[in-house]
Image: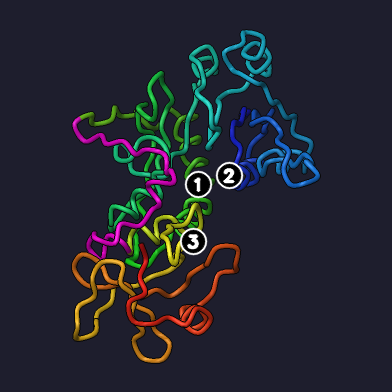
Amino acid sequence: MRIGFFGTPEIAAKCLRYLRDLHEILFLVTGEDKKSGRSQRVHFNPAKAAALETGIPVLQPHSLKDGDAAAQINSFGADIYVVVAYGMMIPGSIFDHPPLKTVNLHPSLLPRYRGAAPIQWALINGESATGITVQLINEKLDAGDLVLQETVDIRPDMTAGELYGIAMERGGPLLDRALDLLRRKAVAPAPQDESAVNYCSKIDRDTAHIDWTREAYRVHNLVRGLNPKPVAWTVFRGKTVKIWKTAVCADPPESALTPGELARFGRKRLLAGTGDGAVEIQLIQPENRDVMESSSFINGYRIEPGDRFE
């Protein structure tokens, strides 16, 4: 099948590499190059790097609303367009052009978690399962007809990084199955149940700020849902600290901890009070320091009674 591919981050690169061994990838449309670091060097995004490995043409338009961009993309004569985390809305003049239209890979069980950060929010909300969806694109965000879905179970200690890794591994094969079904006209894409829709917002700094008055399991879910990016944070002795890993404490000390209050438990364990108990802090990163285990934090910062996360 002749495919036009749209995508930017690592999950897009992974899917591109998988599909290029099975289909003819005519081009990649991806985000513009960005400069980073002190030297302001240009670094190619993961999808662009993957395309250049085998000489796939790379298009980086500033906007897809430009008629010239649409004409250039559509001139390749693709059978179908595949979108994986491209990052910009695609107009109808493009997504409706190929004979088999345009499909999008979304890491949730649509219509649940339309929008940004579906992996993070599934974990923050304590879901026991989520999934991956291949859907047709239409004018509305993540609202197109469903082609194929696959469920992914979520462990209580799973992080966003781990769940993202599963989506990367399964995304390419799921897309290939969906492409085959569409090519053979062996599937009738189904409209989404609008009564079951919910949306998830982007993760900002306020979202990542830990509220210690919340229940222990909610604090734990926030921490794992934001690992490895942007990482949940709090304040200790006037400075920001990032909390990378926690566990809901099943054996809290006899004297209850107030929200945010810290306590050493044994020689190496560090507990923080929550609205209904405590969580154990397992990995923590003080400002301008590397990630460390709680025992190193206890010894390095001489944790004493009365210390707390603000």
- Classify mark 3: residues with Cα within 10 Å, few (<14), some (14-19) or many (20+): few
Was residue 199 drawn as part of the magenta stretch in this picture? Answer: yes
Residue 229 picture location, percent across and down: 50, 53
Residue 300 picture location, percent across and down: 53, 81
Q: How many marks?
A: 3
Q: Earlier in the sequence, mark 2 or mark 1?
A: 2
Q: Which mark is residue 239?
A: 3
**The residue tagged with tag 3: helix, strand or loop?**
strand
Tell me, yes or no, whether the two marked residues, 3 and 1, touch with CB atoms within 8 Å: no
- Classify mark 1: residues with Cα within 10 Å, few (<14), some (14-19) or many (20+): many
Q: Earlier in the sequence, mark 3 or mark 1?
A: 1
Q: From the viewer's perspective, is the residue at label 3 or at label 1 nearer?
A: 3
Residue 152 picture location, percent across and down: 37, 55
Tell me, yes or no, whether the two marked residues, 3 and 2, touch with CB atoms within 8 Å: no
Tag 2 residue: 15
Residue 157 picture location, percent across and down: 37, 68
Quadrant holding the C terminus: bottom left
Q: Amino acid at mark 3?
A: Lys
Residue at screen point 21% across, 72% down: 277
**The residue tagged with tag 2: helix, strand or loop?**
helix
Q: From the viewer's perspective, is the residue at label 3 or at label 2 nearer?
A: 3
Drawn side of residue 17 relative to residue 84, left or right: right
Residue at screen point 53% across, 27% down: 88
Q: Which residues are magenta?
A: 195-219
Tag 1 residue: 171
Q: Is residue 77 above or below residue 68?
A: below
CA distance separating discs 2 and 1: 6 Å
Q: Which mark is residue 63?
A: none
Q: Amino acid at mark 1?
A: Gly
